[in-house]
Amino acid sequence: MDLISISKFSHIDLRSEHEFHKCTIPNSKNIPILNDAEFEAVGKKYKDNGQEAAIALGLNIVSGKVKDKRISEWKDHISLNKGCSIFCFRGGLRSKIAQEWLRENNIVVERINGGYKKVRNKILENFQNSQIYSKKWMILGGLTGSGKTVLLNKFSHSIDIEGIANHRGSAFGRTNTPQGSCANFENILLFQYLNNNSSTILLEDESRTIGKATLPNNWYSKMQSSRLIVLEIQMEERLENIFEEYIEAELKISDNKIFLKNKYLTALEKIKKRLGGELYEKIQILMEDAFENNSDKNHKEWIYQLLHNYYDPMYNHKLSKRKSSIIHRGDFKSCQDYISSNIH
C-alpha cells in the first residue's frame, strides 16, 4: 500500500459520521452510505438476526430517493476529485455496495484495499520504520512567547505540529475549537511528513504531548536527538506576544471575558500543585482582577509570573540537558537568516 499515492487525493469515507470524526484518512470527505442512526439500526439487526437480515434492512433504508441522493453526492465529489477512491472500515460490504451502485450509474471508482483499518495500520508501521527518519531535522526552540511558530511558518520546509494538533502546547494552549483524536493527529502528521520533499525538516521543539495529542515514540526521540536552534527574545517582547495572542486576539474572536477568564482559571488549576499554593493564589488574584478591570498591566503581570516562575525554569532545565545539540542562538532575524542558509 502506497501511502504517498493515497495522500494525494480527497477520498470518500463511506462510514457513519461518528466513525469519520473518530478517525479517518486525511483530506477525506465523509459521505456515508449509512448515517449514524441507520448504521446503529443495521448493527443491531446484525447482532440480533445475522448478516443477511442486516443487509436487507440496510438496502431497505437506503432506497429510492435516499439512495439516489447519496449516489448523486458521491458522483459530484468524484467528478471534482479525479483519481479519488472510496473506502469503509475494512474495505468490505459498504464500499462494495457503493461501488456497485456507482457502476450501475456509469461511474467507475476504485475501493481502497483493506479500508481505513489497513491504511491506519500502515501509518503506524511507518512511524516505527527507521527509514522515514533518514532526513535531517532542525528543531526550533526557545522560551514561551518567543514567536517560534511565526518563524516556523515562514519556511515551506517546516511542519507545524501545534497547528496539526489544534493546540498551542501548554496548559493554556487549548483553542476555541475541539482537538481531533490522537489517531487523526498521527495520520495528518505522517501524511504531511511524507509529502514534504525537503531534505531537511524544520520543527518546533515540543513536549511529547500537545493537549491530548501524543507524538509517536520514535518521532519524539528523533526530535530530542536533532540539531537545535534557540530563538532568544527579551522578556518585554515575549510578554507582548503572549498578551496579543492569548488576550487581545482571543477577545476579538469571542468578545466573552467571562468565558476566557474561566478557561484560563481552569488551566491554572491544572498546574496548581506544580506552582505551589502561594504562587497559584498570587496569579489567580492578578488574573481575576485583570479580567474584572480590563487591566493590561495585570494581564502582563500574571503572564510574567507564570513565565518567570514556572515556564522559563522548566524549559531552561530541559535545554541544559541538550547543550551539545545547540547549533545556533539568536534573535528572530538571526535565527531566520541561519535557517535560510542551512535548510534545503
Image: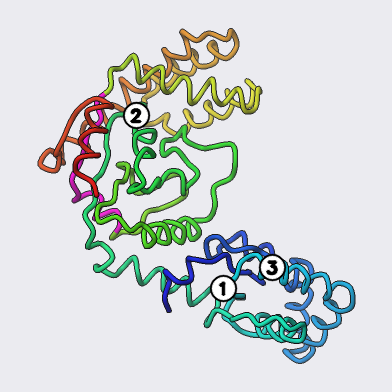
Which residue is at a point 34% across and 47% down the rendered structure image?
Answer: 158
Give the Cα separation between the discs numbered 2 and 1: 44 Å
Numbered disc 1: secondary structure: loop
Find residue 135 and report its image quarter.
Answer: bottom left
Q: How is the image coloured?
A: rainbow
Q: Amino acid at mark 3?
A: Ser
Question: Which of the two discs, 3 and 2, labels the residue nearer the N terminus?
Answer: 3
Type of amino acid at the residue the image marks with label 2 = Thr
Mark identifier at residue 16: 3
Q: Which residue is mark 1?
A: 83
Three-letter code, disc 1: Gly
Labels 3 and 1: the sequence-earlier one:
3
As displayed, is residue 267 above or below residue 130?
Answer: above
Label 3 element class? loop
Which range is magenta?
Answer: 219-232
Q: Is residue 90 magenta?
A: no
Residue 108 location (% of width, % of height): 66, 82
Q: Pointer 1: residues within 10 angstroms few (<14), some, or many (20+)? A: some
